[in-house]
Every structure is written in C-alpha cells, then in structure tokens.
Amino acid sequence: MADTVLCEVADDGVALLTLNRPDRLNAWTYEMQLTLFDLLQSCADDERVRVIVVTGAGRGFCPGADMNDLSALSSGDDAVDARASRTDTRPITFAMSIPKPVIAAINGACAGLGLAFALTCDIRFCAENAKLTTAFSRRGLIAEHGTSWILPRLVGPAHALDLLISGRVFRGSEAAELGLVNRAVEDELVLDFALEYARDVAANVSPASMATIKLQVYEALSRPLIDALDHANLLMLESFSKPDFAEGVQSFVEKRPPAFPALAAAASSPQ
C-alpha cells in the first residue's frame, strides 16, 4: 500500500508526494487515498515540512478512479465504497484542512476524481498540454466530491456548468485561462516550477501566517464580508504580539532571510 504514494521531505522544508501507479497513469484507488491522506497528515505534523507538493509519477497526474473499481461498482458490487465508509471518514477535501500550503503539480492526464482532488489543493500548476476533464457526466454520474461547490468559485458558474455538463477534454493552457489552475507551464517544467515556487515560500514566508491565511480564505467563502473583515481585524491584532511579526520586521530591516519558527504539530480539522 505504501508504494502507491511516495514521500520525500527535503532539507528546504518542501515535501514531495508522488502518486505512484505509473502503469495506470496513477489511477485512484482506495488504498492510494488512504496512503495519500496519511502522508498529508504526517506532513502536517512534521515540523520540518512547510510546503507540500503533490504530483504524479510518469506521464499522468491522475485520470480518475481505477476502472476496475468503477466496473465493480457499476455491476452492483459496492465493496470498495463500503470498505471506505467503514475505515476512513476523511473526505476528498482533506487537503484543504491541512494547515500548510498544498500545491498540485499537474504533470499530465487529470480527470474525474483526480481532478476533484487537484481542485482541493490550494495552488495548482499544470503542464500546458495536459488533458483535463471532469468526466462525471460521461460516466452517468453527477458532479462528485464537492466539484459543484469548488469549480464555480474558481471559474464562475457558466464555465463550471460547461466543464461539468459536457465532460469535455480541455488542455492545461485553457485551464489557466479559465482560472482553474494558477499557471500553465511547459510540460517538462511543471514539477520544477512547482518545487521552485514551494522553496521560495518555505524560505521566506511565516508558517503561522500561511496556516492562518489558508483558514481565513476557506472560512470566508461562507461568511458575509463584514464578518470576514471583523475576524481579520482580530487576527491582525493578535499577530502583532507574535514572534513571527517581530522576525518579519527585523529580517526586513536587517536585509537578511527570515528565520520564522516552524508550525507546531496540530491535528487537521475536517472540511
């Protein structure tokens, strides 16, 4: 099971998680999900880790659920789904609850459940020629795993309905134009680009600030503006007395890299 996702934690504070079923373009299985979520939690608890990058081994990122599992479900055998409900309650949005930035480096084919997971990552970089599709409607399914909530917030309702209803294939370059991914880069450079971005953030940004900002953004999606403003004002007052603020100002004045303290281990909250 452990080999379905690889984990490397570098000295620069970046953890690289690699979906590792290249012979199946990293098709999603329940075992892969368990391992991935366990590793995300491990990275959340590891004080060495400041930023997490997720990518796929070989030519694909993740083309969705493994067809063997889908075939079993379509034939009336719901053992896979039943097994998941009995032993793991973490939703597909689990990455959103990790108090550290999770970056998807979409290196190739990304569809269905694979795309749903990528959408729950905080930042997405994509190979410009990667093929993406929601795919659900072409399998007789609905907008699964929160995509009907996430997609309209990224690309607007009209584009979200286009992608979800048609299930059409689109390239990474269009995904960037729509705002579904942050940037499309040359195919062979997407992982290097994501890692370079992650290293810069890990070296220069306060882990406590990142954790708070991530929580602010996701909570504010369901808050009125005035409530979000009041909450931000309270958090800002609190931050003035924290060591990260003192270090941020002092390192700027002294023209040196900041030495922010690591984020203390904390359990993730469910989304």
Image: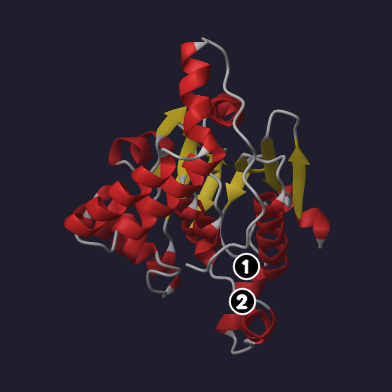
In the image: residue 84, left or right of residue 165:
right
Amino acid at pointer 2: Ser
Alpha carbon distance from label 2 to label 1 = 6 Å
Amino acid at pointer 1: Met
Horizontal and vertical percent position of residue 85: 62, 83
Residue at image coords 71%, 61%: 38
Residue at image coords 70%, 81%: 87
Q: Which element carries disc 2, helix, strand or loop?
A: helix
Q: Is residue 68 visible?
A: yes
Q: Is residue 167 visible?
A: no
List the residue tagged with mark 1. 67
* Quarter of the view holding residue 152: bottom left
Asked if marks 2 and 1 touch (Cβ < 8 Å), the reply is yes
Other residues around mark 1 within 10 Å, as few (<14) / some (14–19) / many (≥20): some
Most extreme residue toward the front is 241
On-image quarter of the N terminus: bottom right
Horizontal and vertical percent position of residue 218: 38, 56
The residue closer to the viewer here, 226 or 202, is 226
Other residues around mark 2 within 10 Å, as few (<14) / some (14–19) / many (≥20): few
In the image: residue 166, left or right of residue 57:
left
In the image: residue 87, left or right of residue 254:
right
Residue at image coords 25%, 62%: 223
Horizontal and vertical percent position of residue 56: 65, 44
List the residue tagged with mark 2. 71
